[in-house]
Amino acid sequence: MSLLVIDRETVRDLLPMDECIDLMREAMVALSSGETKQVLRQIIPLEGGAAFGVMPGAVPQVFGAKLISVFPANFALGLQSHQGFIALFDPANGATVAMLHAGEVTAIRTAAASAAATRVLARENAHRLAILGYGEQAETHARAMALVRPLSGIMLWGRSPDRAAAVARRIEGELSVPVTVTRTVRDAVAEADIVCAVSAAPTPILEGAWIAPGTHVNLVGSSTAATREADDALVARARVFADHREGVLRQGGEVIHAIAAGLIDESHVLGEIGEVMAGTLPGRRADDDLTIYKSLGAVVQDLFSGWRVYRRALAEGRGVTAPF
């Protein structure tokens, strides 16, 4: 018995963003059609706003789990905020076959899932992107959005103008798209067709009154019941779609707060993005619809991604094999 250990660089090489966007469509359709199994994420709060999470699940090809720590303060230290590993198990005999760098898989697949959702929910002529936050997901989301819509400009907001400017320069250099750092969130979203909220803000930074009709919003940065990036008014105005409906109803802070405020009920979460992708649930119905994709992250995304990387690593002789 042997175990293949796959590092960050190998994950990055073998999971290109364009292919991962298509792969996330497969994963989310499989989740919504009942082909996969997963339970709610188990999250243990740690000191200083950090957390430790366990995400088990099974897909047709493989089963396994992601064990990951989330340390938002790592960005200032030049480290990934998400660190850990994804363990893959052989469904034929239960053997552990691989361990992959979870931080890099998470960085790629989260943005790819948002892009897959944007592809089916944003207006076809959407071309102005606003990104709220300047962590790792800001750059991966810019990269992913550019693959599903022809971007003419990006507005970037972050609490530190200097850090935001540094990220803006990197994005602009990679994508050859003008990136403007804004003073406020309101300025960033004022003319946006697509908004990606990827901050670690514990309380709302985005207000519904600032969002124009027809905008598509990806809510990504908040991942617990007690935190939210958008206010109740935005949630109440929008057609809301979840990555995993049960998870969003129990752990999606924006939705939970709007329900508690009496502005919506559970039916306001119309369904899962996988249903929209499969064509079984209407997404955008008109150009002036405001749509939200609420992303908490589903382990099926990690398992589809991990399996793809593992199979390619075997074929190309990548990774480190260890007796196990």
Image (tube, rainbow, N blue to C red):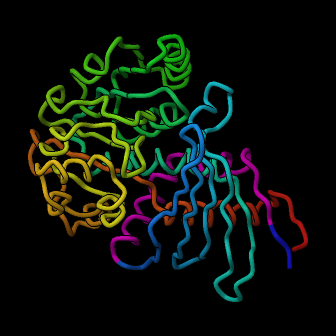
Q: Where is residue 275 drawn, in percent x and y?
A: 27, 66
Q: Which quadrant holds residue 251?
A: bottom left
Residue positioned 41% across, 53% down in the render: 296
Say which of 260 and 243 sits in front.
260
Indicate the position of residue 110 as horizontal and vertical percent values: 48, 48
217 within the magenta span: no
Residue displayed at 23% across by 63% down: 271
Where's residue 307, x and y in %?
A: 62, 67
Quadrant of the image for the N terminus? bottom right
Q: Main secondary structure of the magenta part?
A: helix
**Quick one: quadrant of the C terminus?**
bottom right
Q: Is residue 12 magenta?
A: yes
- Quick check: 215 left or right of 220? left
Residue 313 relative to residue 113: left or right: right
Q: What residue range appears in magenta?
A: 4-33
Indicate the quadrant where residue 212 lies. Answer: top left
Residue 156 lies in what quarter of the image?
top left
Question: Which is more toward the observer, 61 or 34?
Answer: 34
